[in-house]
Image: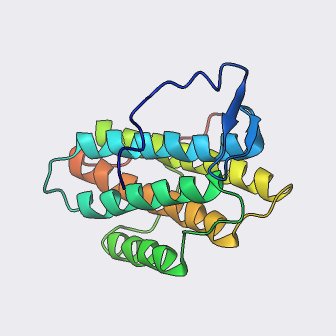
Amino acid sequence: MGHRLSKIYTKTGDDGTTGLGDGSRVAKDNLRVEAYGTVDELNSFIGLLRAELCDDHALQNTLSNIQHELFDLGGELCIPDFILIKEASISRLEQAIDTLNENLPPLKDFILPAGGKAASTCHVARSVCRRAERRVFSLSQQEKVSALALQYLNRLSDYLFVAARILAREHGGTEVLWQRSN
């Protein structure tokens, strides 16, 4: 593959544009850039979550795979008409959700994004995932985007919600239930 990033700064973005993976240039606030930038932000929060967990934690392997898939998704969004996310990635997330959810009690109330540092970090990642999904949807209204990209982000936010429930129980003992104000 060689040394693709031998020079970190190029000054080509000083005019408010950035290069897409196909070589075209767009404004830095372009919907496509916003979409893959938010996916990158999500990936960073998942990295932060992984740093909160011990190396042999049961979630580490899945979270590592998710980070790689998010990098693929970012690449897919960076290159118009390019597809990297496959149905198998969505199926893996669904299986992971089902496995985690097996031992959780059914929810009877909404829970607050709390429950310890790892659970709270997971909730932040979940909310950023929802924003990434909204950005990708907005992009899909103007340009062609794979339906699998949206499905992946939707499942991922579900996975992160269930993972946050697991982490809240591990580190805080309980989930924090929402108490409606009168």
Image location (x, y in percent) of residue 141: 85, 57
Image quarter where the C terminus lies is top right
Image quarter where the N terminus lies is bottom left
Q: Is residue 162 visible?
A: no
Image location (x, y in percent) of residue 53: 21, 46
Residue 73 vs 123, above or below: the answer is below
Residue 172 vs 105, above or below: the answer is above
Tell me if 13 is positioned left or right of 112 in this view.
right
Q: Which residue is pictured at 44% across the width and 68% down the height? A: 106
Residue 86 vs 160, above or below: the answer is below
Say which quarter of the image contains residue 73. Answer: bottom right
Tell me if 13 is positioned left or right of 120 in this view.
right
Image location (x, y in percent) of residue 150: 65, 64
Image location (x, y in percent) of residue 18: 67, 34
Q: Nearer the viewer, residue 97 or 75?
A: 75
How many dots with numbers? 0
Tell me if 167 is positioned left or right of 94 in this view.
left
Q: Nearer the viewer, residue 131 or 37?
A: 37
Q: Is residue 2 visible?
A: yes
Q: Which residue is pictured at 31% across the width and 48% down the height? A: 168
Say which quarter of the image contains residue 95. Answer: bottom left
